Image: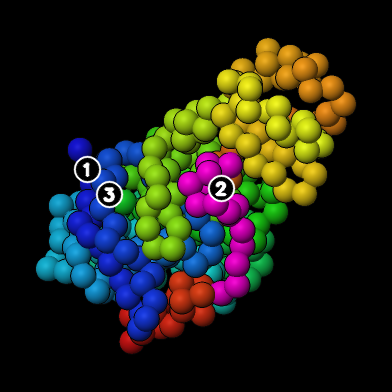
């Protein structure tokens, strides 16, 4: 059953179309990823689904509620973890959650039990009485995951949840996110430009670029559609002319004197190809990645770009306006 549905959802800022006529369905209980570079429209889409930003056109339903006609019901149904830290430094972890419980009007007894549960879920119960300014970046992110879950939402939106974290801390946050789905029975929508994050966590991924969804499927299926693994060779022009005769070579891309190939059944076919070519130098052999998928469908690799209308300053401005 679809817990999120969008119908031609669009957002325009002046001459810029940040999100263009997006139609998608997110199923209950899945981790759904929006994968793309900064500026692709991922955060803008989340802001509309969470009712923090009005669409220019189109509509959407979250947990059965229309984002235009029933925004309060949508907000009751969702939790949100923003890119930028939003917990109060001066308050303790427990006090931050207690304040959130008051905002959602949770009864005292329910709030107390719920705070304990979510703090235990993210392994912060023993640090509940420490001020948040004493938390590490990873601890603070885990606290915000706990806060997003406090009111038992049906959907949890995570906007670049591991941005700026070191690899070890990022791995820990991934483990907590996986636990949330199992223990909290929540649907998660995550935006990211980390390929390994989408590959590790997501049941399905929508690759988004310039405000449009260019392809949507499971990470496994998206990679398998490329037709093989990636091989980079240093070749001469004579070698390049001979590549076309190999039926197991599915894609050829040349950059300088290095050629990137997508090769089917690389273990069997690569030795045959190298023998036939003679003198080719192997630069790299690796499995296909979601970055290769993005490159295939958009003609460029995912990269971190400068701040855009969906970047940090824009997000902070929207949140400040909503909190007035």
Q: Are marks 2 and 1 in contact (CB under 8 Å)?
A: no
Q: Residue at x 46, y 35 (%)?
A: 222
| In-image side of 31 versus 231 (left or right) | left
- Residue most toward the right? 279
- Residue most toward the left? 69
Q: Please tell me whether residue 138 belongs to the stretch shown in magenta.
A: no
Q: Residue at x 15, y 52 (%)?
A: 64
Residue 110 drawn at (x, y percent): 29, 54
Report which residue position mark 3 lands on: 24
Q: Secondary structure at mark 1?
A: strand
Camera-side residue of 283 and 148: 283
Whether residue 264 is visible: yes
Within 10 angstroms of label 1, few (less than 14), some, or many (20 or more) residues? some
- Label 3 or label 2, whichever comes before in sequence order: 3
Residue 290 drawn at (x, y percent): 55, 41
| In-image side of 229 versus 72 (left or right) | right
As measured in the structure, the alpha-carbon distance from the residue carrying label 3 to the one carrying label 2 is 22 Å
| In-image side of 118 versus 48 (left or right) | right
Q: Say which of marks 3 and 2 sits in front.
A: 2
Report which residue position mark 1 lands on: 2
As measured in the structure, the alpha-carbon distance from the residue carrying label 3 to the one carrying label 1 is 10 Å
The image quarter containing residue 28 is: top left
As measured in the structure, the alpha-carbon distance from the residue carrying label 2 to the one carrying label 1 is 29 Å
């Amino acid at each position: 059953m679809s817990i999120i549905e969008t119908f031609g959802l669009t957002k325009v800022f002046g001459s810029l179309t940040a999100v263009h006529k997006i139609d998608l369905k997110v199923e209950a209980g899945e981790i759904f990823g929006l994968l793309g570079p900064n500026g692709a429209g991922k955060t803008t889409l989340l802001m509309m689904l969470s009712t923090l930003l009005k669409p220019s056109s189109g509509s959407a339903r979250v947990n059965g509620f229309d984002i235009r006609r029933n925004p309060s019901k949508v907000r009751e149904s969702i939790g949100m973890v923003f890119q930028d830290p939003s917990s109060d430094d001066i308050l303790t972890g427990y006090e931050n959650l207690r304040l959130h419980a008051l905002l959602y009007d949770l009864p005292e007894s329910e709030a107390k039990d719920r705070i304990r549960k979510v703090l235990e879920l993210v392994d912060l119960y023993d640090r509940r009485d420490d001020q948040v300014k004493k938390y590490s970046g990873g601890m603070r992110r885990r606290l915000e995951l706990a806060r997003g879950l406090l009111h038992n939402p049906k959907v949890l939106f995570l906007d670049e949840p591991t941005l700026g974290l070191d690899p070890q801390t990022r791995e820990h946050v991934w483990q907590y996110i996986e636990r949330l789905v199992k223990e909290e029975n929540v649907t998660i929508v995550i935006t990211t430009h980390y390929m390994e994050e989408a590959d590790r966590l997501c049941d399905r991924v929508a690759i988004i670029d310039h405000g449009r969804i260019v392809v949507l499927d499971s990470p496994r299926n998206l990679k398998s559609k490329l037709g093989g693994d990636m091989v980079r060779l240093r070749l001469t022009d004579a070698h390049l002319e001979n590549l076309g005769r190999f039926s197991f070579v599915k894609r050829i891309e040349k950059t300088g004197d290095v050629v990137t190939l997508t090769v089917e059944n690389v273990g069997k076919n690569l030795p045959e190809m190298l023998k036939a070519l003679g003198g080719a130098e192997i630069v790299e052999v690796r499995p296909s990645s979601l970055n290769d998928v993005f490159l295939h469908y958009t003609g460029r690799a995912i990269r971190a770009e400068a701040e855009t209308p969906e970047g940090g300053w824009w997000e902070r401005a929207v949140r400040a306006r909503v909190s007035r």
